[in-house]
Amino acid sequence: MSSPLARTRQYLLSGVSYAIPFVACGGILIAAAIALAPMGPAGPDFSSSPGLKLVLDIGSAAFSLLVPVLAGYIAFGIADRPGLTPGFVGGFIANQVGAGFLGGLVAGLLAGALVYWIKKLRVPVYLRPVMPILVIPVVSSLAVGLLMFRVLGGPIRETMVLLSAWLRVMSTGSSVVLALVLGAMIAFDMGGPVNKVAFFFGAAMIKEGNFLVMGACAAAICVPPIGLGLATLFGRRLWSDEEREAGYAALAMGMVGITEGAIPFAAADPVRVIPAIMTGSAAAAVVAMLGGVGDHAPHGGPIVLPVVDHRGAFLLAIAVGSLLVALTLNGWKRFAARSPRSAT
């Protein structure tokens, strides 16, 4: 990986690490509220459960902060503290113009690069004390805001709309192919922009009364962390102490539908881990689709079991995908360990 790409990846991971708690908080609260609410003909009915509606609103508030926090801390990773303000502003605007998660990534990188460049400028001595607290935040936020509102926000929103339209066209053809694509997308970047396009497509289909698409996504979402956690349990000698500890955390995150639990493993060994989890999640999505699994909540993993149709098929899909990930990775590791040319 070239140095610029490696640095960009580091900046993105910086933003993701700060955004994960918001994902966990929002996802768990929303899933819990939906799971406990009475089920009506059109899904969860909160009209007689004001307490659960409050929990749902709090979870939605946490989710609404996801993109600004992500953009803000990507900019922070590039330009340190002065990057926070334009990053947060750019992420907030990305939400407002419908550019979503992808817009947040662009806004964060843009804000960080702009502030980094401004910090390199030579300015008069009397201006230096106010540069980080006044000049840089105002100038960079104005520039990033104008670009997001007038130049970049619209095309990014249209890109997301086109990608969603492509998935919608696929949903009218082969449901199995759609499940394969969505499952692979969910696992590909573990909470990244590709994952979010698939997830938000599934959530949008809930509003249209199609719960099968979200059912396939819900099964695929938890497979990467659960599969990797199982791999560390099944083949303890193949993994280091740190990896086994990460495996316990991955299992816990998988049970509440947080795909990001697989990131530490993918960062350490992307060539083996990413294809394995994509295969496992795609398999889980196909089994869920064929089993008629419907998910009434915009979330995934075993935590949404109370609001899932055909629960047996849902659990079977997760088991098939997770075992496929665990057995594939442990098989590769055993093969590599026996190979005289490999040190692993």
Image (cartoon, rainbow, N blue to C red):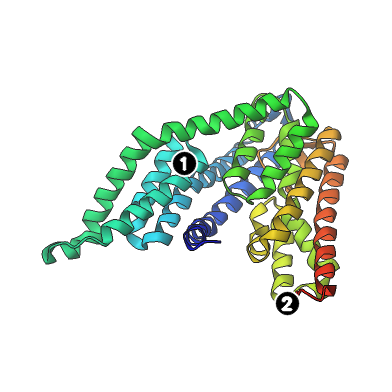
Q: In the rendered image, which quarter contains the N terminus?
A: bottom right
Where does residue 315 sit, x and y in percent of width and height? 84, 46
Q: Is residue 58 left or right of residue 28?
A: left
Counting from the top left corner in percent of width and height, residue 130 is at 19, 61
Q: Which residue is mark 1?
A: 103
Q: Count residues near mark 2 (Cα–Cα under 10 Å), then give few for <14, some for 14-19, many for 20+.
A: few
Label 1: element kind: helix
Please state, as top left, top right, bottom left or bottom right, where the C terminus lies in the image: bottom right
Name the secondary structure under disc 2.
helix
Q: Is residue 269 left or right of residue 17?
A: right
Horizontal side of 97 relative to 61 (left or right) equals: left
The residue under the point 36% across, 51% down is: 111
Q: Is residue 157 above or below residue 326?
A: above
- Which of the 4 image quarters holds residue 166? top right
- For residue 319, above or below residue 41: below
Q: Identify the residue at image location x=63%, y=63%.
A: 267
Q: Please state which of residues 84 and 21 is positioned toward the viewer in this rendering.
A: 84
Alpha carbon separation for disc pair 2 and 1: 38 Å
The one of 117 and 305 positioned closer to us in this rendering = 117
The vertical placement of 301 against 230, above or below, is above
Q: Is residue 302 visible?
A: no
x, y percentage for residue 48? 65, 31
- Percent coordinates x, y for residue 298 in the rendering: 65, 38
Residue drawn at (53%, 55%), measured in percent from left and top?
16
Label 2 is placed on what type of residue? Asp
Q: Residue at x 67, y 60 (%)?
A: 270
Nearer to me, 119 or 64: 119
**Circle 1: residue type:** Gly
* Quarter residue 164 falls in: top right
Q: Earlier in the sequence, mark 2 or mark 1?
A: 1
For disc 2, the marked residue is: 241
Q: Quadrant of residue 212?
A: top right
